Amino acid sequence: MLAPAAGVVVTAVDTVPDHPAGTLPAASDWGNQVVIDHGTGEFSVLMHLKQGSVPVRLGARVVAGAVVGACGNSGRVTHPALHYDLLTHAAEGRDTRSLPAQFLDYAANGRPVARGEPRRWQRIRPR
């Protein structure tokens, strides 16, 4: 998984075990995660990362495209997946608002997208 934009890592969790696909643990909702403060009142949250895959640490400055983890099955998810949110706050469980997130130059379900917002269940890949 890559940082979607530059910022400072305000949360980096790498210790939640991945669980077997098809099960749903009661543990941490977000599982292994990286939260990046973009300095604009926007926080990127990348959740359900693979245990042991997060190379960044709290306070690290990241550039757009920096590796921040690998797809995993940690937290409240039934299969390996990345859950990405652009939020107004960085704390799990806090009353926060989701913001629209625009991405550049990617493929959605095999079709090129110059700029857009990925939709639920789409398979997203770099172009």
Image (spheres, rainbow, N blue to C red):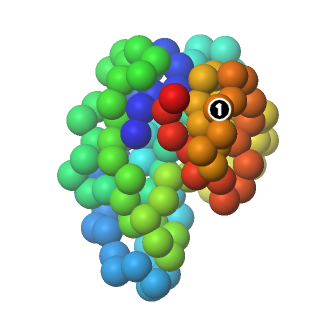
Q: Is residue 5 left or right of residue 87?
A: left
Relative height, residue 93 to residue 116 (above, below):
below
**Residue found 73% across the figure and 48% down from its top:** 119
Q: Is residue 95 left or right of residue 106?
A: right
Badge 1: few (under 14), some or many (20 or more) residues near its Cα, within 10 Å? some
**Residue found 25% across the figure and 47% down from its top:** 53
Q: Quadrant of residue 107?
A: top right
Relative height, residue 21 to residue 36 (above, below):
below
Q: Residue flagged by tag 1: what amino acid is it?
A: Pro
Residue 18 place in picture, x, y as percent: 31, 68
**Residue found 33% across the figure and 47% down from its top:** 70
Residue 105 place in picture, x, y as percent: 60, 23
Camera sees residue 31: no
Which quarter of the image is occupied by the N terminus?
top left
- Outermost residue toward the bottom in this view: 23
Numbered label tally: 1
Relative height, residue 94 to residue 104 (above, below):
below
Q: Is residue 43 left or right of residue 62?
A: right
The residue at which mark 1 appears reads as 112
Residue nearest the viewer, comparing 40 with 72: 72
Camera sees residue 50: yes
**Residue found 65% across the figure and 39% down from its top:** 111
